[in-house]
């Protein structure tokens, strides 16, 4: 079991989740974060911290399309352990549907 970052994070990337993860298993893309499923200890601490409600356990149907995305990019993007600045327009994108096609494959920082 692992927790999974899903569509709601795209272009929001508030990074509150990063601050609370005890095992530093978040990885950063240009406009999205992912969780490395092999490192996540399934503690659930990050889930309520996300202002965009983007994090779900992989057993949740909302995570279904995103487990592989998290696994793939966790192997390509750099580890992030400290919260940086959220995008200036993060609040404008919060809760917007249909963001999936806006996911950037570029690494963060
Ligand atoms: S707190 Fe939520 S929106 Fe922000 S980076 Fe983490 S998963 Fe993405
Ligand atoms: S569930 Fe726990 S270990 Fe997994 S990403 Fe969230 S805070 Fe980190």
Image (tube, rainbow, N blue to C red):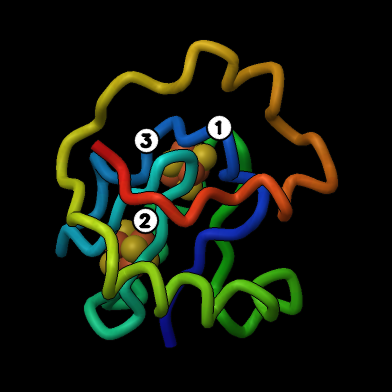
Secondary-structure class at tag 1: loop
Q: Position of residue 39 (x, y in %)?
A: 22, 78
Secondary-structure class at tag 3: helix
Determine which quarter of the picture holds residue 35: bottom left
Are the residues flagged by discs 2 and 1 in contact, CB closer than 8 Å?
no
Residue at mark 1 to residue at mark 3: CA–CA distance: 11 Å
Q: Is residue 89 above or below residue 70?
A: above
Determine which quarter of the picture holds residue 12: top right
Mark sitting earlier along the chain (2/3):
3
Question: Which residue is tagged 2?
Answer: 45
Please report the residue visible at 63 percent of the width from the left and 18 percent of the height from the top. 91
Res 12 label: 1
Closest to the observer, 68 or 51: 68
Determine which quarter of the picture holds residue 61: bottom right
Please report the residue visible at 54 percent of the width from the left and 73 percent of the height from the top. 57
Quarter of the rendered structure image containing ligand 2? bottom left
Q: Position of residue 51 (x, y in %)?
A: 55, 33
2 with respect to 83 (left or right): right
44 with respect to 9 (left or right): left
Q: Position of residue 92 (x, y in %)?
A: 70, 17
Question: Which residue is tagged 3?
Answer: 16
**Ligand 2: does it lie within 8 Å of the C-beta at label 2?**
yes
Please report the residue visible at 27 percent of the width from the left and 85 percent of the height from the top. 38
Mark sitting earlier along the chain (2/1):
1
């Amino acid at each position: 079991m692992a927790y999974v970052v899903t569509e709601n994070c795209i272009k929001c990337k508030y990074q509150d989740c990063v601050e609370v993860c005890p095992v530093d298993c978040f990885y950063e893309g240009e406009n999205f974060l992912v969780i490395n499923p092999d490192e996540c200890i399934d503690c659930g601490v990050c889930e309520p911290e996300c202002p965009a409600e983007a994090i779900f356990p992989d057993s949740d149907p909302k995570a279904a399309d995103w487990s592989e995305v998290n696994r793939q990019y966790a192997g390509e993007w750099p580890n992030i352990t400290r919260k940086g600045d959220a995008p200036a327009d993060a609040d404008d994108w919060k809760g917007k549907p249909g963001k999936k096609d806006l996911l950037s494959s570029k690494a963060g920082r």
